[in-house]
Amino acid sequence: MLKARSLKFIAILTFFHLISAPCLAQPKNWDQGLSNMMDGLEKEVGKDGSPLPQDLPPEPQQEKPASSSSPPAIPPQSTPVEPAADHTQDRSKVLSELLAIKDNYLGNIAEQGLTRWNTENMPIKVFIEKTSSVKGFDPSFPTILENAFKSWADKSQGKLEINFGDSVQEAHIVCRWTDDHNDLMSPKEGGNTVVVPTQEGIASVDMKILTLPAPNAESISPSYMGRVCLHEAGHALGLTGHSPERADVMFATVYSTDAAALTDRDINSLNELYSMDEETLASIKLNQDRAMQETNTLLDSKNPQVNAVQLNNEAARALKANQFEVAMKKLEAAHKLDPANKLVCANLGAVYANYGTIAGMTFNLKGAADYYGKAVPLLETGNNKQALVQVLVNYVKVLKMLNNKAEANKIESKLQSIMGH
């Protein structure tokens, strides 16, 4: 048998209001002049992220020496305030009601918190690696995995829409194959599904399926691979825990004799998750701080994706402690390990952008241009349009002040393209 327990969560950083000063935790050496500059920048960008026809940003009240350790205040994680006693009771009531339902196991999963894809991300874009040189790979595997996603979607009562594409950059879910147990969080796992949750829902998923046979088996049968794929696809679509019943696809262990078919309990659990109203879901949403702690209890891993997750979480803690330089170095290391990780790209791009802003405020225009130049491709990969627009607007201003008209025109064209002009 091959254990398919594979899901771990990434605790994320949230930088959606990248260049906004109000309600931010301020570094110790923050001064009112910088706050005024930040307010001015926000007014120029506009509430909807579109640039307004304004002059260059106002000069700071006084010049401050550039600091390598204290960029502008970065918004803290959007982790909910610790619930009050009555909210805790509401959560307990919801869990009790879910656990009392006998035709699904969502209550078991809800004990650790729930997350799901929101309607804004529909259709969910899935990339499946079509060929691979890894040991044991069979050309039929991609079709089996695609059919696994389709099986869940077909039984979702129209709540899930899935499109398959060839672009890794545009995909919400990226699926690849591996013959290395070190690519998994446990050498006994048949797949590794890393779900990135936010308070708004699932942001992205990275999946790897093992192409080696189960213990005591000489080869991988289509049925066995189908069962593993159904299990991992279930995680990717929001069933972030496991069923206590062996017959269910989402049981924690996959046996070589198991059928590759969803049970009624599997189907009911998915539909219960996507039928839940937002208020009820909010009472039992995944606790990101707890998820970060769980992720960081993993044993040392040779999997670069897992290590990138750990470094990202360490960067989150460093930011909370106002250790900006430490956070940047950890995110740079995470990006080197897993350059395709959209969350790491978005976070590192945000840190670079904040450093660029503080450099510009202290008249270090070359430094600002360098940081903005590094931030732009990362924010593009991270799919954070609002932050990208804000950075491009200020990048153009800095380039013009440096009299770099050619590069300014290039960035201005990119900005206009993004804004649809």
Image: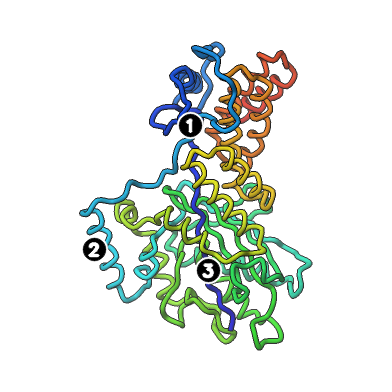
Q: Position of residue 321 (x, y in %)?
A: 47, 42
Amino acid on which disc 3 is placed: Ser
Q: Is residue 293 above or below residue 2?
A: above
Which of the two marks, 2 or 3, is nearer to us in this view?
Answer: 2
Q: Which circle's residue, 2 or 3, is located before the other in the chain? A: 2
Q: Which circle's residue, 1 or 3, is located before the other in the chain? A: 1
Residue farthest to the left, as pictured: 86
Disc marking residue 262: none
Instruction: Name which residue lies at 55% across and 35% down.
Output: 385
The part of the image, by quadrant, that contains residue 22 is: top left
Amino acid on which disc 1 is placed: Ala
| Residue, disc 3 | 151
Give the alpha-carbon distance from disc 2 to disc 3, as whole Å. Answer: 32 Å
| Residue, disc 1 | 73
Q: Position of residue 106 (x, y in %)?
A: 37, 68
Q: Specify whether residue 54 is in view.
A: no
Disc marking residue 93: 2
Q: Which circle's residue, 2 or 1, is located before the other in the chain? A: 1
**In-front residue for pair 177/419:** 177
Disc 1, disc 3: CB below 8 Å? Answer: no
Disc 2 secondary structure class: helix
Q: Is residue 187 above or below residue 82?
A: below
Q: How is the image coloured?
A: rainbow
